[in-house]
Image (spheres, rainbow, N blue to C red):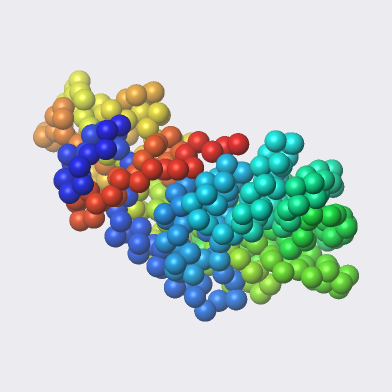
Amino acid sequence: MIRPPLGIDLHDIDTPALLIDLDVMERNLQTMADFFKDKPAKLRPHVKTHKTPLIAHKQIALGAIGMTCAKAGEAEIMVWGGVKDVLIANQVVGREKIQRVVCLARHATVTVAVDDPVNVHELSQAAEATGAEVGVLVEVNVGMNRCGVEPAEPALHLAKEVLAAKGLKFRGLMGYEGHLVFKEKFAEREAACQRDIGRLIDTKGLLEQSGLLVEIVSSGGTGTAMITGMIPGITEIQAGSYVFMDGRYKSIEGVGERFDCALTLLTQVVSRPSPTLIVVDAGMKAITHEFGYPTVVGHEDMKVVSLSEEHGKIQLADPSVRIRSGDKLRLLPSHGDTTINIHDMYFGVRRGTLEQVWEIAARGKFV
């Protein structure tokens, strides 16, 4: 896409285009930063949402202690963009990826998650050979049943493996309560977090009783940040989606009231085949729908009913609505992270005017 001149009206941007309302984004960043300003736990925001060093630096300027990444590729983009402390909240497996990470650790503080002694050995060999030191968090399964060793003794055993490994520094524990972040009722989400994160805190206590120093206990997503972040013993929170929000998170009690949606997709009507149906130029290649179809901003009487590769069908409740080919609408994604990952750039607007065009530098970095 050709970059449009700054200062134009947002409706003059070619479509489909991923818009950021900069005022809303900045309020979201400030709201989360203010919450954690005086808390023992600190923010280590997840970059898998925004994928952009410039936004990461905004978060760091507001007090974030570093960044969380999903993959080695995201970590590289952040470090190359000047971020000095990154956590890859994932297992880094395979010779090539491990080598990339240990080399990156020569230029920044890099920490990875582990849940397997073979992986610990491979990381150790590569780090020692490279002359680097890689930080390690033992990932504990707190109920999501994805990655992680079981709490208590299995976690202690693996932590001791890390301590004995050359080139690695045991830094603590990580446990992600991602199975709880979308519980809609705050009280139910809070009780479940206390229960499941309690397993992580109990494991911390066991390690400390065994003489291990647990510097970091990392956890939390946008849906649980203000709950998990208040649990004694948690040192950092990995929330990411709060920066933009999306349709799914906006419906969550205790989250939707604090943060507003900054990210929308500008799309254009290309056809009105019937009085109650319009077709827009945004389909699955422009906006994702694994959490449900997007909604039409400012038009409760319009409903997205299907997405094909390049087209979206929108049903009109009122056939007398005056809308025709060339008119533009904004769609609110149900899931921001996966929508962002299929775009090359953001169009930052403020009060209806294009102010910035930013490359999504870590777009597609799934390796």
Q: Describe residue 9's horizontal placement relative to residue 195 as left or right.
A: left
Q: Position of residue 298 (x, y in %)?
A: 23, 47
Q: Is residue 346 above or below residue 84?
A: above
Quarter location, residue 213: bottom right
Q: Is residue 249 above or below residue 170?
A: above
Q: Relative to the observer, which residue lies in front, 308 or 9?
A: 9
Q: How many marks?
A: 0
**Camera-side residue of 86 and 195:** 86
Residue at screen point 74% across, 63% down: 171
Q: Residue at the spot x=66%, y=53% of the render? A: 106
Q: Quadrant of residue 236?
A: bottom right
Question: x and y percent of residue 319 in the render?
Answer: 15, 31
Q: Residue furthest bottom?
A: 38
Q: Is residue 34 visible?
A: yes
Residue 240 position in % (x across, y down): 50, 55
Residue 120 shows up from this direction: no
Residue drawn at the location 49% of the way across and 51% of the way down:
81
Q: Residue at x 42, y 43 (%)?
A: 360
Q: Quadrant of the N terminus?
A: top left
The outermost residue toward the top is 273
Q: Is residue 44 left or right of residue 196?
A: left
Quarter of the image with the C terminus is top right
Horizontal placement of 106 versus 37: left or right?
Answer: right
Query: Where's residue 157, x and y in %?
Result: 88, 57
